Amino acid sequence: MTSAQPVPRTVLVMASHAGLLDEIRRIGAATECPMTETAPPPGRQVWSRARAVVLDAAGAAACVRERMPRRPGVVLAVDGEPGLMHWQAATAVGAEQVVALPAGAAELVRVLAQRPAGGGGGAVVAVLGGRGGAGASTLAASLALIADETRTSLLVDCDPAGGGLDLLLGIEDRPGLRWPGLVVEDGRVSALALHHALPVAGKRISVLACGRAPDGREPSPVAVQAVLDAGREADDLVVCDVPRDRGPASAAVLASADLVVLVVPAELRAVAAAESTADFVRTHNPHQMLVVRGPAPGGLRALDVADALGLPLVAQMRPEPRLDGQLERGGLRLGRRGPLRRAAVAVLDALVERAEPAEPGWVA
C-alpha cells in the first residue's frame, strides 16, 4: 500500500483585476510556485487544501459572503497603495498580510516561498453509510488502523447517535478528551494539544469520540472545521465518521474532505436509500467513491450498485468473519488478511492515486 498522502498543494489565486493578476502570475513563475486560479468563492475543499491564498478585495468579499472558514496563509493583494476598504476586506476575510503590488513584489515572493506551518501535507477522508447500519463506522476505524502502520492519524467521530468510536475500538475506558469537552477558540485548535489530550488507539491513532451522554449533540461546524484544519496542517490522516442527518457539521466535513467514501450494502432497499445520500454528497464534494458490502442476498452485483448510484467503485467487500463477536469483546482489530483490511487499503490507495480503480474483484 502506498502511504496515504494527497497531491501537492498549490497557491489559490482569486483576482479580477487584470494587471494585478498578471503581477501575481509573474511572481508565481519567478518563485516556481504552482498556482490555481479560480473565480470566487472557491469550494471549501479547495480553500482548505491550498498552500496559501492570494486574493483581491472583490475575492475577499465573496469569501466572506460564503462564510469561508478562517485559515492561515491568506494574503490580500492590492494594485497600488492599500486604502481603508482594503484593510477592512483583509480583516473580514482573516488575511495575515496586505501586499501592495508591484512595489511589494519582494514581500509576496517571501510569502510564497515559505512552507506552511506543519507542512500541511495531511488528508481528510469522510466515510458515511448509504443507509443506517451500512458499516461506515467500522470502515472508518479500519482506515485509521491501516494508516497507523505508516503515519499518525486522527479519527473523528461526528455521529453523536453512533455509540462512540472509542467503544468500537475498545478504548472507552481510556482517559482523554471527548467532543463535549473540546473548547475551540477563534475557530482554531492546536493539533499538538489534540494529540496530547485525546485517547489513543493502536500506536498513534488519536480518537475524538462523541461519547454517550444522553444530551449528546452534533459537534458545531466551526469546531469540526478547526479539528480538520489542525489535522491537515499536522500532516495527519484525518478519518471522519459522518452521520446521515445532513446537518451543518456533516456538510462541513464533506466540503473539506479530499475523498468521500459511501458504504452501501448489496441490497436493493439499501441502494434506493443511498441514492439521496449520494446526491447530497455531490452538492458538497465531487470526489466520491463507493464501497459495496456483502452479502448480496438477492444476487445484486457491486457494479450494478455503482451504475445505479453513478459512483466509481473502489472496493466490494465480503462479510468480515467473526466481526460481531470481536466488537463485543475488546473492540475492532484487523488481522493480516481479511475483507476489511483489503477494502481499507483500496480506499487509501485511491486517496493517493486520485483515480478511479479498475474493475475490483470481491475482497476475499
Image (cartoon, helix red, strand yellow):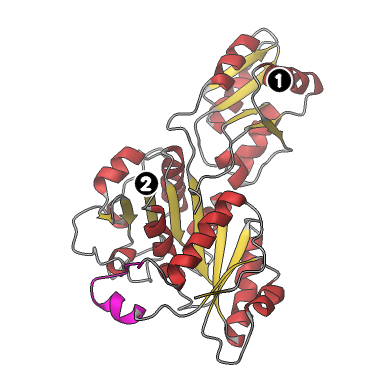
The three-letter amino acid code for the residue at tag 1 is Ala
Residue 143 image offset from top left, x and y in percent: 43, 60
Decide: is 53 above or below 349.
above
> 51 or 244, which lies in front?
51
> 77 or 196, which lies in front?
196
Asked if residue 330 lies in the magenta stretch, the reply is yes
Q: Residue furthest right?
A: 18
**Which residue is at 38% across, 71% downward?**
161
| Mark with earlier residue (1, 2) | 1
Q: Which residue is labeled 1 in the image?
A: 29
> 198 or 316, which lies in front?
316
Element carrying mark 2: loop
Label 1, residues with CA under 10 Å away: few <14, some 14-19, many ≥20: few
| Contact, mark 1 vs mark 2 (Cβ under 8 Å) | no
**Which residue is at 68% across, 41% downward?**
41
Q: Which of the numbered marks, if any, corresponds to residue 303?
A: none
**Which residue is at 63% across, 51% downward?**
354
Q: Which residue is labeled 2 in the image?
A: 152
Q: Which residues are magenta?
A: 323-335
